[in-house]
Amino acid sequence: MPRHAVVDVPARHAPAVLASFALAAVAHIGPAVTWLPGLRYRFFPRLAGAGRPDHVALTFDDGPDPTSTPRFLDALDGLGVRATFFLLGESVARHPALAREIAERGHELAVHGWTHDRPWLPAPARETADLARAVDAVGRAGGRPPRWYRPPYGILTSSRWAAARRVGVRPVLWTAWGRDWTAEATPASVRTAVGARLRGGGTLLLHDSDRHSATGCWRASLGALAHIVEDCRAAGLSIGPLAEHGTEALDVAQPGSRGTLSIRRRV
């Protein structure tokens, strides 16, 4: 075969090959556009965690962590509040007794994946296997199959959507967060960030661990927690886990309506 023919064949097909890769990449990462809070809240309210307009769902990510999680459990006990904890499967495997304690103290266990990775490359088989492992670990710790799944970083690729469907968990993200994962976070900044976006019917994301964020940043969330609960109650909102949130109800209070948080003083 002439040398030019060897070069000519791949060159001729290169545009089609590149187009196929581009389409595959878009198909894989495209659903992650739901990470954008404004778009998610408006067009995908169930995914955002929209629920009863008189209720706020309180959720924590990245545990269980033996250093910090027990402090949150004690604080929640003192406030008379229950929450949903999105747990990492590998951390549950390391600290099964702590995961069981979360459930025994009345909180809801949910799944945050097996590890806290970013899914830039398609890996449907691995995503399904890892999520199934996490669901099994969390289910054994809590004594019942978990219902909810929040992927690390809130990045929902097509592989993660498919994995969630296969293992029977429902993806849910958030409507407000405390920006509590940075070294600069303080109780006051967490409370302010929450108050800027949280409304009745919303789902709040905080972190009970610093394992995948700035060292010690969980103290900012812990310091803000009582004040956030106080702000919700002052606005006439109950606060609790996703199990009590009524996520089928999508009539979420809009800014300016009943249920808007009012931050009257700083922590």
Image (cartoon, rainbow, N blue to C red):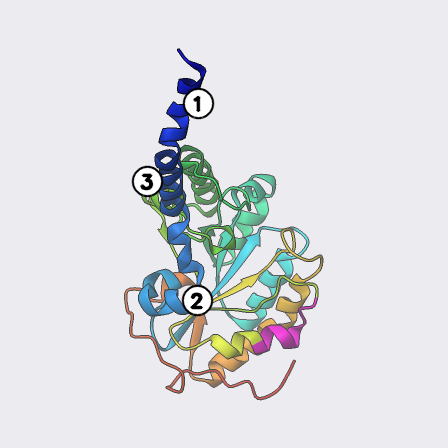
Which numbered disc flags the more N-terminal residue, 1 or 3?
Answer: 1
Task: Using the image, tell me which numbered label, if any, was put on residue 37.
Answer: 2
Q: Is residue 44 above or below residue 211?
A: below
Which numbered disc flags the more N-terminal residue, 2 or 1?
Answer: 1
User: How far across and down, in percent of the image, does residue 62 sit?
Assistant: 56, 53
Residue indicated by mark 1: 7
Q: Is residue 143 above or below residue 1?
A: below
User: In percent of the image, x 34 and y 70: which residue is there?
Assistant: 42
Q: Is residue 183 above or below residue 138?
A: below
Which quadrant would residue 79 be assigned to in this image?
bottom right
Which numbered disc flags the more N-terminal residue, 3 or 2?
Answer: 2
Q: Nearer the viewer, residue 234 or 261?
A: 261
Q: Quarter of the image containing the C terminus?
A: bottom right
Q: Amino acid at mark 1?
A: Val
Q: Is residue 257 magenta?
A: no
> Decide: marks 2, 1 in contact (CB < 8 A)?
no
Q: CA distance from mark 3 to mark 2?
A: 26 Å
Mark 1 Cα shell of 10 Å, populated few (<14), some (14-19), many (≥20): few
